[in-house]
Image (cartoon, rainbow, N blue to C red):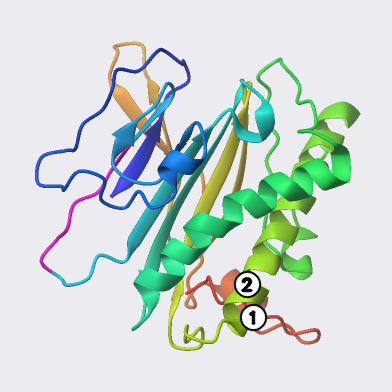
Amino acid sequence: MGSCLTAEQRPAAAAGAAPGVKEGEGRRREEEVPGRIAGNGVGNAACLFTRQGRKGTNQDAMVVWENFNGRTDTVFCGVFDGHGPHGHIVARKVRDTLPSKLRDLIYDDYGESPISNSDGSILEETLSPYADAEDKSPMSGQKQEHREFFCTMKDSFRKAFKVTDKELKLHRTIDSICSGSTAVTLIKQGHDLIIGNLGDSRAVLGTRDQNGRLVAHQLTVDLKPDHPSTFLSYFPISNMFHFSVAN
């Protein structure tokens, strides 16, 4: 299960159901928002596909939202892998609410998506919601304008994750203690990628080498309890904070 985002947008033909998948499956709100795909489908810049396996209930959910926040150069992608008895409900709940919360936060705080740089440079910093983890991320040597853009988007990601987590805890029919979901989300704006993730779902960038062969680049670090930095994030010395959408 996964989504694929291309660097170049092109007009997409009407997409039918994929083999083995019922028409309209997993598209509860897709038709309500232009450019939003919440099940198997193809857009101008992305495609999504998932198929029911033999393990039981499919607890995966995914979404692509083109023209995100009203910008033609911006796409939101998210993949969510549920776990636990209500994992499929949590994953779909996060899929249906997190992107809208992120969009609204960006608009409420800044009026529109902050303008990114256009030179294709890369700014890398952990988007962890835990303060002790993010303080260790270096930002030296970057332009001030790009730094401000990244910080703006990072704050919006953090707020959206926190609000979503709070709503999951307060939901009467969802057991967010024994159930949850991973979340790997990204916004592609121009030449920039802003990625926020919880759990062990992974974002991978595909490029071509000089011979035209596909090369995969891992963009995120799996956040698992057995990883030292993840353990410290889950059990800080003070100000403990728990995320229902993380493993």
The residue that label 1 is drawn on is 242
Q: Are marks 1 and 2 in contact (CB under 8 Å)?
A: yes
In this view, 92 is above or below 235: above
Find numbered disc 2 in the image and state the secondary structure of the residue it sits on: helix
Of 196 and 204, the residue lying toward us: 196
The span shown in magenta is: 48-54
Q: Which mark is residue 165?
A: 2
**Dot 2, how many residues are within 10 Å of its Cα: few (below 14), some (14-19), or many (20+)?**
many
Q: Position of residue 69 (x, y in %)?
A: 67, 34
Q: Which mark is residue 36?
A: none
- Can I make out residue 82 in this image? yes
In this view, 173 is above or below 245: below
52 lies left or right of 214: left
- Can I make out residue 143 in this image? no
In this view, 203 is above or below 134: above
Residue under the image location 17 percent in, 38 percent down: 18
Residue under the image location 43 percent in, 59 percent down: 80
The disc, 1 or 2, on the residue closer to the chain's N-terminal end is 2
In reply to whether residue 36 is colored magenta, the answer given is no
Find numbered disc 1 in the image and state the secondary structure of the residue it sits on: loop
| Amino acid carrying mark 1 in the image | His
